[in-house]
Image (spheres, rainbow, N blue to C red):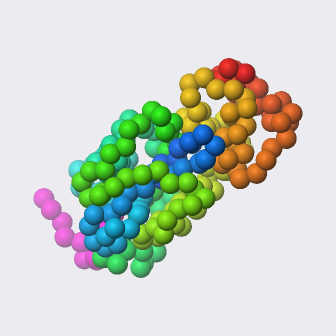
């Protein structure tokens, strides 16, 4: 039995901010749009949620379809719902973010993406929709989590040194850290995944 709602409903999308570390540079995965609006512009991977899937299933599907990346852990970031964020219609997006090791994934554009590439967080192109705002919120979340939780291992090789871990933190936080204090605070994390 179907029901017709009295009030119009906004469309629902998902968008994914995927962070990777390349040598000493924090990167974000972007797609070049094949379809309007913003044809040819760079954007975060994402798209409309199907009626028969959860939000996370939609995010994983869009990521796989547009970039070729599969089997990645996504964490829900934030919901963006500014009235004019999409010129097509009233669209609300639920965003996710992930941390990946660049060497572990081969990217390939497909479906409505004409290209896919990693871009330095410090040198992003102009982004479609409100994706610059989404990236800023995701970067803020990543920086905040680094301060209170041992994350970032997904960005490093399976074996890493404390120097590599410190460089990761400095890159994400955008500032230098005192080597002695960093080593004292993080030596227990290195034994979990690093070589010391």
Relative placement, left or right, of 72 versus 54 is right
63 versus 133 height, above or below: above
Name the quadrant containing residue 57.
top left
* Quadrant of image for the C terminus: top right
Which residue is at 33% across, 55% downward?
A: 115
Residue 102 pos. (x, y %): 49, 39
Res. 58 in view: no
Residue 99 pos. (x, y %): 52, 42
Which residue is at 68% across, 20% downward?
A: 195
Residue nearest the observer in this picture, 186 or 105: 105
Look at the image and say whether residue 125 sits in the magenta stretch. Answer: no
Residue 183 pos. (x, y %): 80, 31
What segment carries the magenta color? 1-13
Prevailing SS of the magenta stretch: loop
Residue nearest the observer in this picture, 157 or 3: 157
Name the quadrant containing residue 123.
bottom right
């Amino acid at each position: 039995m179907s029901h017709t709602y009295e009030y119009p409903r906004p469309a629902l999308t998902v968008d994914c901010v995927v962070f990777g570390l390349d040598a000493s540079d924090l990167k974000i995965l972007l797609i070049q749009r094949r379809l309007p609006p913003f044809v040819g512009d760079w954007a975060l991977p994402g798209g409309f949620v199907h009626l028969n899937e959860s939000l996370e299933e939609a995010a994983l599907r869009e990521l796989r379809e547009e970039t070729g990346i599969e089997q990645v852990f996504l964490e829900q970031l934030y919901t963006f719902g500014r009235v004019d964020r999409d010129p097509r219609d009233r669209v609300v997006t639920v965003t996710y973010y992930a941390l990946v090791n660049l060497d572990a994934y081969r990217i390939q554009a497909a479906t409505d993406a004409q290209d896919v590439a990693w871009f330095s967080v410090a040198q992003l192109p102009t982004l479609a929709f409100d994706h610059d705002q989404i990236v800023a919120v995701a970067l803020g979340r990543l920086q905040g989590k680094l301060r209170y939780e041992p994350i970032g291992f997904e960005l490093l090789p399976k074996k890493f040194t404390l120097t590599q871990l410190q460089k990761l933190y400095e890159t994400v936080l955008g500032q230098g850290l005192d080597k002695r204090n960093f080593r004292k605070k993080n030596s227990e994390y290195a034994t979990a995944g690093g070589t010391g």
